Image (tube, rainbow, N blue to C red):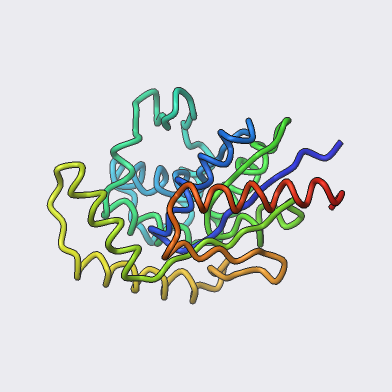
Amino acid sequence: MTVPVITIDGPSASGKGTVAALVADQLGFHYLDSGSLYRLVALLAIRRGIPMEDEAALAEAARQLPVAFADGTVWLDGEDAGDAIRGEEIGMGASRVGALPAVREALLERQRAFRQAPGLVTDGRDMGSVVFPSATLKVFLTASADERASRRYKQLIGKGESANLPKIKQDIVDRDARDAARTVAPLRQEPDARLLDTTELTIDQAVEAVVQWFREQQASGL
């Protein structure tokens, strides 16, 4: 029996990670935050002094990445890295290393290994186009740049961090352009992906939409 996979791709700060994790929880599936792998490579590069343009060294770091997912967080070299990888600097670094073909290739099989029974929900930028092209359900989740900037701003303020809304929005716009323009696995909606615009939706509404689409496909035998 083929293990079902739900891929949720979309731009940064669109809420895809939150939605994917809740969908996985509701269905009792495994969850993979693919973006965390690229963030971990960026974090490791910064800690080890690896230049962001040294593709060979970064790819080797990706192949040997000492990562583990447990207890609702991500561990790097036995250390809880959940908070460390969420900073803006690491996010920008992840976007840069994610544009390198050798790094993406190094992480490809690692990501595919997460496809285990009873099912997998994964989010990222190329989950449906490259990593799991035959996924059971593909979703492209997005929201307006203004809404995404507002969400990120509130998230940072809620953590007690300083935040500049105009800068956050500009960073989001810049990253969208960079992710869409890269030659390897550019950010795009696949022809067979369902579009989910969450600008006017609550998290619960977005989760319900994905779960409903999946159950409809299962019922129809697709």
* Picture residue at 32% right of the left edge, 45% below the top: 86
Q: Residue 121 sits in which quadrant?
A: top right
Picture layout, residue 208 above or below residue 179: above
Q: Please give left or right for residue 19 compared with residue 130 in the image.
A: left
* Picture residue at 31% right of the left edge, 51% below the top: 90
Q: Please give left or right for residue 40 compared with residue 217 in the image.
A: left
Q: Please give left or right for residue 144 compared with residue 206 in the image.
A: left
Front position in the image: 6 or 196: 196
Q: Residue 13 sits in which quadrant?
A: bottom left
Picture layout, residue 64 above or below residue 196: above
Q: Position of residue 32 (x, y in %)?
A: 55, 40
Front position in the image: 74 or 123: 123
Q: Residue 194 sits in which quadrant?
A: bottom right
* Picture residue at 46% right of the left edge, 63% below the top: 11
Q: Position of residue 181 (x, y in %)?
A: 49, 76
Q: Position of residue 179 (x, y in %)?
A: 46, 69
Give the total number of marks visible in the rendering. Answer: 0
* Picture residue at 68% right of the left edge, 53% below the top: 213
Quarter of the image with the N terminus in it: top right
